[in-house]
């Protein structure tokens, strides 16, 4: 358990640095920014304590916030994503496999895993853009932002999954 | 009673959610309103120094073009100096130049600083730039920031060693401008999307302007002296039922490429603001 936590903290630091130094600087079409740190939150095992999940989400979001001058915004969105994560995940677990699993293409099948990730990430970006815009009067900006960013992040989710399978 | 306690224990993650979301919203709100809230931004020492270390390496790649720009700017300033000197020579016999110089210096309300950009974002709705000078170097809130191309933004928050600049590419930024020499003044705002363009709003209908006119700072606000270039009018937008017109402006600064900036502080800002406040009462 403790070694597991150490590995997670190490991954946390590496991913946070990659996120803020590379991915937060990239912005396609003026709207889309990939949040690859969500992969870490999506891949925590299903039976992780619910409070622990929330705390990982909050601090990961806060770490990214500090570096992107958006105090509180990523933290709020990532916490909500972690909160609804397990409910969404349970929709995509095939009956034949044990309940305690680590979400991945191997355990959930490709379709299930990508659907699960897409829904979670779309929820994350909806909250993020709603807070950042602080209005629903600009639905086009909101929807393009959510759609483009979700799509971009999903590409990285899929790429990560392909490489982790070949290992 | 036992039931209530059981209920609370069973659903404790709901309370944790509320607490964490509460903290997030306090952070969001305090960043917007509370002066000096820089702990959770890139103006804090850890984040600032990480970006500064990266920038130390990164800045070498742009060094050549940076030098060319500075050299050109120097050349322009030298030429201007030459012209002004020759004009001074003409009048030097008729009046006391030294006295004029002294009085100009004494009356000038503006003082300048230089700084390097350590972090810059352009992909958000509210963009900020972090610079490597802070309150220890005499930087204060609401100083104007520009470079040799034009206006960049206004200092939003300062910590001891870093400062956060609200760039023009921020939905909260609102810059007082005028068009060319026409003296019809208006405000410049950015509403997200394309980082090369911003919009002039509040243009009075009687104002005459056309495509290609230069937009400069008005000098009405206490942040910038007058006549610093901002952008060029790209197209005019006719808004039928509005009292004011709008115009699309191409910004002179390429915000994806900023490395050295100048800051301007107004020594008489407080005096001006106090006077304006008294009038409003």
Image: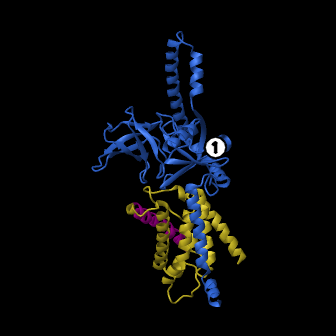
* Residue occupying the point 60% across, 21% down: B102
Residue B252 counted in the magenta span: no
**Residue at the far right in the pictured view:** A2
Is label 1 in a helix, a strand or a loop?
loop
Q: Which chain is the one coloured blue? A: B
Which residue bears the numbered disc 1?
A: B133
Q: Is residue B239 left or right of residue B257?
A: left
**Residue at the far top in the pictured view:** B93
**Residue at the far front in the pictured view:** B281
Above or below residue B228? Residue A22 is below
Above or below residue A23? Residue B249 is above
Whether residue A164 is visible here, answered yes or no, is no
Above or below residue B26? Residue B158 is above
Residue A20 picture location, percent across and down: 58, 58
Given the image, what chain letter belongs to the residue carrying mark 1?
B
Q: How many marks?
A: 1
* Residue occupying the point 38% across, 62% down: A140
Residue B120 picture location, percent across and down: 55, 50
In depth, the one of B83 and B228 nearer the eye is B228
- Which picture quadrant has residue A111? bottom left
Q: Which residues are magenta?
A: A141-166
* Residue occupying the point 50% across, 89% down: A95
Q: Which chain is the one coloured yellow? A: A
In depth, the one of B113 and B104 nearer the eye is B104
* Residue occupying the point 60% across, 77% down: B15
Residue A38 picture location, percent across and down: 55, 68
Residue B251 picture location, percent across and down: 43, 43
**Residue at the far left in the pictured view:** B240
Whether residue B33 is visible here, answered yes or no, is yes
Residue A165 counted in the magenta span: yes
**Quarter of the picture holding the N terminus of chain B:** bottom right
């Amino acid at each position: 358990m403790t070694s597991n936590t150490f590995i997670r903290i190490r991954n946390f630091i590496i991913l946070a640095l990659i996120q803020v130094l590379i991915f937060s600087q990239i912005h396609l079409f003026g709207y889309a920014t990939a949040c690859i740190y969500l992969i870490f939150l999506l891949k925590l095992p299903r039976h992780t304590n619910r409070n622990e999940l929330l705390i990982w989400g909050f601090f990961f979001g806060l770490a990214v916030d500090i570096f992107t001058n958006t105090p509180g915004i990523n933290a709020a969105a990532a916490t909500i994503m972690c909160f609804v994560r397990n409910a969404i995940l349970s929709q995509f677990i095939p009956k034949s496999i044990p309940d305690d699993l680590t979400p991945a293409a191997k355990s959930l099948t490709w379709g299930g895993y990508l659907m699960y990730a897409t829904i979670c990430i779309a929820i994350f970006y909806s909250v993020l853009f709603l807070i950042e815009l602080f209005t629903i009067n600009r639905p086009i900006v909101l929807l393009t932002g959510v759609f483009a960013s979700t799509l971009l992040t999903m590409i990285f989710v899929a790429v990560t999954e392909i490489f982790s399978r070949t290992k | 009673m036992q039931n209530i306690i059981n209920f609370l224990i069973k659903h404790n993650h709901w309370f944790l959610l509320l607490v964490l979301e509460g903290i997030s919203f306090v952070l969001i709100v305090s960043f917007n309103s509370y002066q000096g809230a820089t702990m959770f931004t890139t103006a804090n020492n850890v984040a600032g120094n990480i970006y500064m270390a990266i920038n130390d390496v990164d800045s070498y790649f742009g060094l050549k073009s940076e030098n060319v720009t500075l050299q050109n700017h120097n050349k322009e300033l030298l030429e201007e100096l030459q012209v002004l000197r020759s004009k001074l020579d003409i009048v030097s016999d008729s009046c006391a130049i030294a006295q004029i110089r002294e009085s100009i210096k004494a009356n000038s309300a503006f003082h300048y600083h230089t700084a390097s950009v350590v972090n810059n974002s352009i992909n958000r709705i509210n963009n900020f730039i972090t610079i490597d000078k802070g309150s220890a170097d005499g930087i204060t809130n609401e100083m104007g920031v520009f470079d040799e191309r034009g206006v960049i933004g206004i200092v939003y928050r300062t910590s001891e060693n870093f400062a956060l600049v609200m760039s023009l590419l921020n939905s909260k930024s609102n810059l007082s401008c005028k068009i060319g020499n026409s003296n019809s003044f208006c405000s410049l705002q950015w509403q997200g999307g394309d980082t090369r363009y911003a919009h002039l709003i509040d243009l009075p209908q009687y104002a005459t302007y056309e495509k290609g006119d230069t937009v400069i700072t008005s000098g009405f606000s206490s942040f910038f002296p007058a006549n610093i270039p901002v952008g060029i009018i790209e197209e005019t937008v006719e808004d039928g039922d509005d009292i004011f017109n709008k115009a699309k402006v191409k910004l002179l600064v390429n915000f994806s490429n900023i490395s050295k900036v100048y800051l301007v502080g107004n020594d008489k800002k407080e005096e001006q603001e106090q006077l304006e406040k008294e009038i409003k009462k």
